[in-house]
Amino acid sequence: MSNEPYSVTTSQSWGGRLMESIKGVLAGGAIFIAAFPVLWVNEGCAVKIAKGLKEGAANVVEVDVSKFSAEHEGKLIHGTGQATTPENLRDGVFGINMNAIQLKRNVEMYQWKEIEKTESKEKLGGGKDTTYTYTYEKTWSSQLINSGSFKAPNASSQYRNPGSMLYKNENWTAGNVKVGDYKISNGLINQISPKEKVDYTKVSVPASIASRSKVQADQIYIGDPNNPKVGDYKISHTIALPQEVSILGQVKSGVVGAFKTSQDTTIERLQKGKHTAEEMFAAAQSENVMRTWIVRVVGFFMFFGGLSLILKPISTLGAVVPFLGNLLGFGLNLVAGLISFILTFLVIAIAWIFYRPLLGIALLAIAGGAAFFLWKKKQEADAKAAAEGATPGTPPNPQVG
């Protein structure tokens, strides 16, 4: 459901914009400088984690988890078995009481939400008008939306949400879980995700809930699902039942948990199903590569964002004529992007030489060789073009020194 939009327009002078952009230079400088250690530390962490995982893979011990053995105390082990618990997890509000490793209550309430759209228009002389347009629609949300902060006049009463949620998201976790005959740590337990939906047809939902709800197999709807109203609820539960898992961890005081390598890499992994140690270490290495690339991209955008703020006053100066300001802004963003790419590459390359000298130097040598090869090819092409352009029999012009 949508409603008539409410709009507010604010104006900012050229001087105000200029002062704002100048203030942003300090923030831009801080972000720009912070990008260097972020990228540098990221490369160091990537190397340490990769080495740590390689060390773990070389020292892991394969065990039969169906029979606990004290001889594995202090060792990094790998095993596959059934994850079980003697505990029942309970959500008494909705009548859930099941033998499970994880239980999660998922709650959504039907509420009003505010949608803001912004449109800016630059004016001759450097000023800028910004129009904020607000519309309101109903949506399902797991978080309480504060309608008191809505911008439109009387919106807090016209589009009023409840002041609190009667039911909220909650999680329950078994504290005593074993894989085979080995007890596992909370760190491993928390890696068993609750993904299977509870079937409410097999649950004794309390009469106080059922009498005002539409109880379906995978959902409890409090209200009328055919005519939803603000304040209605949708509740579902997901669980992690006993299941086959594969684990990597150190046996310490009879519990499998985190293992620290000489590189200070933590190895504490659990995967659903049957997986070899090699497969689990390969998955960990892939995650390390993915994380490294994500931080590299973040570092690039830190350089770019910082430089954009530093250069912003220049485009603001040109905004006296809107077309000129936009053109300057586009050109400065291109410059910021190019510089950011070069700096990102340089920091990563230097970090590689520091953390992985042989590989880093080899890559730089290859890059240098490729650049030299392209330069030579260009020189040859230029010489050939000059020779073809000369008139036969005509000596070249003498060079005046």
Image: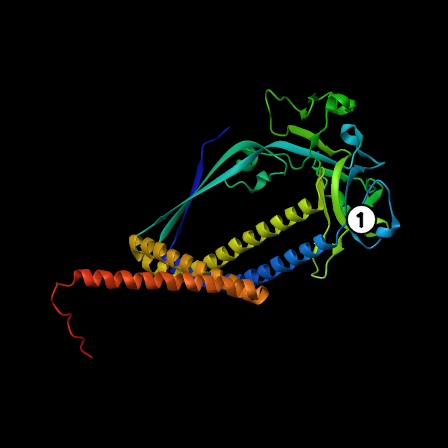
- 47 to 89, vertically: above or below: below
Three-letter code, disc 1: Val
For residue 276, side relative to residue 64 (left or right): left
Residue lying farthest to the right in this orientation: 70
Q: Position of residue 35 (x, y in %)?
A: 53, 61
Query: Residue placed at 83% from the left, 37% from the top?
Result: 85
Q: Position of residue 309 (x, y in %)?
A: 44, 59
Q: Position of residue 113 (x, y in %)?
A: 55, 36
- 324 to 224, vertically: above or below: below
Residue lying farthest to the front in this orientation: 393
Picture mark count: 1
Nearest the eye: 136 or 41: 41
Query: Residue placed at 82% from the left, 43% from the top?
Result: 64
Query: Residue placed at 61% from the left, 48% from the top?
Result: 286
Q: Quadrant of residue 22?
A: bottom left
* Residue highlighted by disc 1: 256
Nearest the eye: 277 or 232: 277
Nearest the eye: 85 or 121: 85
For residue 332, side relative to residue 160 (left or right): left
Where's the C terminus, which quadrant? bottom left
For residue 395, side relative to residue 187 (left or right): left
SS at mark 1 in the image: strand
